[in-house]
Amino acid sequence: AQKITQTQPGMFVQEKEAVTLDCTYDTSDPSYGLFWYKQPSSGEMIFLIYQGSYDQQNATEGRYSLNFQKARKSANLVISASQLGDSAMYFCAMRENYGQNFVFGPGTRLSVLP
Amino acid sequence: NAGVMQNPRHLVRRRGQEARLRCSPMKGHSHVYWYRQLPEEGLKFMVYLQKENIIDESGMPKERFSAEFPKEGPSILRIQQVVRGDSAAYFCASSRLNYKGSGANVLTFGAGSRLTVL
């Protein structure tokens, strides 16, 4: 069963606009963490933001925020004021408390247009 | 304060040869994960290790692949008798502690090792 779903293979956004990258997940574990990573064309994996399943507030890190809707099992990444350097692959990941493993979604390729 | 170190960055092997990929986790990290990434695809979990223990190898092919994380030295991902389908980027990541009750233990990734099988 697919644990992490990212339904947008590719997204385009105009520079300086905001963009939302979708992520839904599947788990029966009440305790888990959700993560977003960025992979630019150079290939490295860069951690962006984390949300714990018990966190009451949505996580924010600079221009990144996570729209966490627990009942819907969604953890969408919002990037505000897009920059050309935001063009990259974005991966949503989950770590279950009991599973201990990190599972990644298939990714969304974001292209920021000038 | 070195991050996760992987080597070699690029490795070329002929079919039937062996590939050894090394990973030194971040200082203070005792958990190592290996992932495989095919071109234009996401990361596929292979194996999760702690020092001297394989915790979860459910993503690793049963044949030709093995992994270890000895008490001393780096973690090694070994691929015997490589085939063209093994060509991929292999990422190692490490984290500090088990997630249970200890907050967000973020995975820190190495730069990856790109294996090309001719």
Image (cartoon, rainbow, N blue to C red):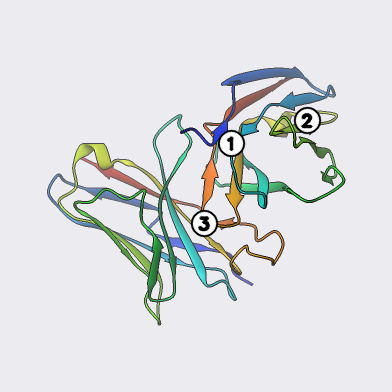
Residue ID for mark 1: A26
- Side (left or right) of A77 relative to B111: right
From the viewer's perspective, is residue B96 above or below residue B35? Answer: below
Element on which disc 2 rests = loop
Q: Mark 2 lies on which chain?
A: A
For residue A77, what is the image quadrant? top right
Q: Give the residue drawn at x 61%, y 69%.
A: B96
Q: Which mark is residue A95?
A: none
Determine the CA span between mark 3 and mark 2.
25 Å
Marks 1,2: beta carbons within 8 A? no
Image quadrant assignment for residue A65 = top right
Q: Which of marks 1 and 3 is in front?
A: 1
Q: Do labels 3 and 2 share a chain?
A: no
**Local crowd size for mark 3, using a 10 Å CA cut-off: few (<14), some (14–19), many (≥20):** many
Indicate the amino acid at tag 2.
Answer: Gln
**Residue that badge 3 annotates:** B110
Labelled pair 1, 3 in contact (Cβ < 8 Å): no
Q: Read off the residue under disc 2.
A: A83
The mark closer to the camera, 3 or 2, is 3
Q: Which marked residue is nearer to the observer: mark 1 or mark 2?
A: 1
Please state the horizontal and vertical placement of residue A70, each as a whole percent of the image. Answer: 75, 37
Q: In this view, does A49 lie to the left or right of B3?
A: right
x and y, in percent, of residue B27 in the image: 58, 74
